[in-house]
Amino acid sequence: MRTYRYRAYPNAEQRENLARTFGCARWVYNWGLERRTNAYYGEGKSLTYNSLAVELTQLKKQEETRWLGEVSAVVLQQSLRNLERAFTNFFEKRAGYPSFKRKSGKQSATYASSAFRFDPKAMTLTLAKQKTPLKIRWSRKPEGEVVKVTVTLDPSGRYHVCLHCRCKVEPLPPADPGGKTGKSVGVDLGLNDVVVTSEGFHSGNPKHLRRAYRRLRRVQKALSRKQKGSNNWEKQRRKVARIHARIADRRSDFIHKLTTDLVKNHDVIAVESLAVKNMMKNRHLARSISGAAWGEIVRQLEYKCEWYGRTLIKVDRWFPSSKRCSACGHVRETMSLGVRRWTCEECGTEHQRDENAAENILAVGATVAACGDLSKTRAAGDV
């Protein structure tokens, strides 16, 4: 499954229909969450998607909630499926307990294959309960079969259309022209440079949040002076949301280009697995760590390597990559974060901290790959 995201510009009639659809989808999600929570804690039983779908059908016949029939029934069913997925992620410890959706947050509605018409030749998309196609800026043509469509409205007022396509992704050719040995690289994640590789590449750190911080602080202070719920408050809230959206877009663009370049040019990528959630507890570095988005970098490397036939090796977080000399293997007892260059006490080799760490990560990754077990990296790091 591959998702293509485009900017959409609905007209007044379509905006009204989408607003009604967003509201109904959000209401059904919150209703289902409340029903499941009360049933578990009050009655001691667990409700599933099928039982809630039956209740929803009866609910639409009642006078008080007859307005649910004004939107596509497929969208309401997809809301219950999204709730089911949220509970599955919670039970499998991939996420926290599902929370209620807010009207002021990001709005979304998912249309299954029976609730939209997509013409790949004319490049038009028509949603259920709408007479005319949406105006969409097609930045590129989607590949594969479109099985679902998700329309979103972010807090800054931008509409986007996401096409979920089922397609076959061809593996990339070997990075080495000979195709025999392949190219391997070790990746060290940091703050001065988001990514430093064993080849000596330094990505730098754009620090998108820090660059926009003064302006963001100014508009947020102006928002705090407005009366909540007023028209001026809503206008100022949009200004704040636009700055946040710009920061998120620029960060996403930087990470996508960086990870794609790594995957295209290397057959094997070794990266350290960091406990980002625990590191965020450091109040002095939390903002910088959040802006670096280490977790998102590793996530993108994972699925892109899986798509294009590359190998990703995660090195244990406790491996002393920074304190260990990549030339002789000597490990220093202590090294503060302020030390950027150091000389090995045993062999006299001078190291740049991050490049040395990347070389050690590459060496451990090569050892793990040679042993044939990509999951036990701590034992390999002690070799």
Image (cartoon, helix red, strand yellow):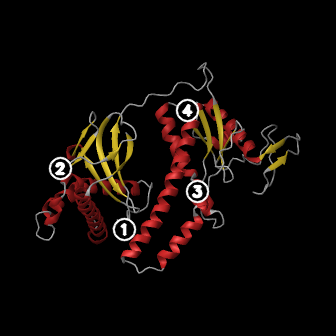
CA separation, marks 4 and 1? 40 Å
Give coordinates of residue 328: x percent, y percent: 82, 38
User: Which one is in front in this view, the residue at disc 2 or the one at disc 4?
Assistant: 2
Mark 4 or 1, nearer chain start: 1
Residue at 50% x, 55% y is 248
Question: Residue placed at 63% from the left, 67% from the top?
Answer: 283
Picture quarter with the N terminus = top left
* Nearer the camera: disc 1 or disc 2: 2
The Cα–Cα distance between marks 3 and 2, rounded to whole angstroms, is 41 Å
Q: Under tag 2, what secondary structure?
A: loop
- Amino acid under disc 4: Lys
| Disc on the earlier residue, 3 or 2 | 2
Residue annotated with mark 1:
104
Real-space CA distance between mark 1 and mark 2, rounded to the nearest whole angstrom: 28 Å
Q: Quadrant of the C terminus?
A: top right
Q: Position of residue 338 (x, y in %)?
A: 77, 57
The residue wearing badge 4 is 264
Q: Earlier in the sequence, mark 1 or mark 2?
A: 1
Q: Which residue matches tag 2? A: 131
